[in-house]
Image: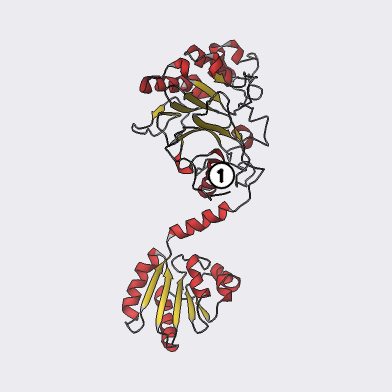
Amino acid sequence: MSEAVLLDLIHGCSPACTGASLLDSASARMSSCCAGAAPRDKRSLSCGTLSACKNVRVLDSGSPRSVCNRFKQTVDELDLSSVRVLTTPQGRDVLRVYQEQLFTPCTPLTTRVHEEEEEEEQVWAFLRQLPALKGDVTVLKSTLIPDCFGHGFSTRTGGVSYIPTLSSLNLFSSSRRRDPGAVVRENRRRLALHAGFHPESLRLVKVNHASDVWVLGKDEPESYDAMVTDRTGVVLAAPGADCMPILFADPVSKVIGAAHAGWKGTLMGVAMATVEAMVTEFGCQVSDIVVAVGPSVGACCFTLERDQALDFQRIHPDCVPDPESAQPHVNIRLANRILLQDGGILPENIHDDAVTERPRVTPCTSCHPRGLLLPCRDGPNFGTQVGFLWIRDTAHRTRPPTGEAV
């Protein structure tokens, strides 16, 4: 006598799943039956995992009850001694009833549940082996931020997102975009591997285009455009594209912050709100804080309606170089620099496009489509890059496990 394997396709088990290897390893005397194959699955059976298996019978019509009954009849006709069932958690509960009603101890059933986690791991393993698109991961770094911190600004190269407007290192997924969460997770893993932190430690602000700041350790708000902390083991990240990712670091007090500043957040004072949180919550001195502004749309390409531009002109006339235009150009980077300097940040402690003696970290995202992502150019299905920052601690392991590779 021999053994039968029931691969339950009715309840979502895939013919290509890990457990299908039970069929491939079966002896020549084994009879294998697959229950409830849909037309799409039947086509895959002819050329997929089961095509190389012997004695495969596809039970592809009728209700689950009739399929199970036909399977039992096949087992009896072939005088098989035992049955192994590969199913899902849902299928296990249903098949338990049929087992009790249709089978006896003379033909014992052994059930293996194919968990969703197994499928997820297969997806992640597949994504990990994909080649990087548009080149290797590239990170811009400010020489103003000392080595006691890890930091950088991501660009668009080195990920696996293939949709043109998202390609390739898109780092944010939402219901409004076509890039799935698993792909974004893989992109974040590749960025983390390149930069030297663990991907699970990355915390991204919940953008609301305002000036709310979350102090890590306190209750998390529903939305906030900035974060501050003195903790090691956490990587603060702020998205940017047309808006600015701004990084704040106090090397004396070992405190960090990250902020997302668009034109609305700039006018609402999100940059200085971040500084004030560092001072109030952790006792930082404003003169010790250094600030790096990441890739964003420059004054060369960013325009607003005239009444909106006037708000920036009130900050400083140079923020609006052509105020008489119907759609004036606006320099939101300069506006943030002026607001920070007015708040006590030393001019030499700000690294933006006004700085020429340091490596460039604030290129215009509109002028560099090959290297940077931009919503106002790419439309609603746009990609996101981030500025990220963490406090280095030799006692805290932030790097991924050895052996993990792109």
Q: How is the image coloured?
A: secondary structure
Q: Is residue 370 above or below residue 82?
A: above
Q: Secondary structure at mark 1?
A: helix
Residue positioned most to the front = 394
Q: Quadrant of the N terminus?
A: bottom left
Residue 117 lies, in percent from the top left, at 44, 57
- Residue nearest the viewer, comparing 157 with 282: 282
- Residue nearest the viewer, comparing 48 with 28: 28
Q: Is residue 15 above or below residue 75?
A: above
Residue 380 lies, in percent from the top left, at 58, 38
Point 36% across, 23% down: residue: 281
Point 43% across, 36% down: residue: 234
Point 38% across, 64% down: residue: 90
- 171 vs 211, left or right, is right
Q: Is residue 347 visible?
A: yes
- 315 vs 216, left or right, is right
Figure label count:
1
Q: Is residue 239 visible?
A: no
Residue 343 lies, in percent from the top left, at 47, 14
Q: Is residue 65 above or below residue 199?
A: below
Quarter holding residue 228? top left
Quarter holding residue 308? top right
- Residue nearest the viewer, comparing 58 with 113: 113
Which residue type does callout 1 highlight?
Arg
- Residue nearest the viewer, comparing 109 with 210: 109
Q: Residues within 10 Å of mark 1 (few under 14, many from 20)?
A: many
Residue 286 lies, in percent from the top left, at 45, 16
Q: Which residue is mark 1?
A: 190
- 63 vs 127, left or right, is left
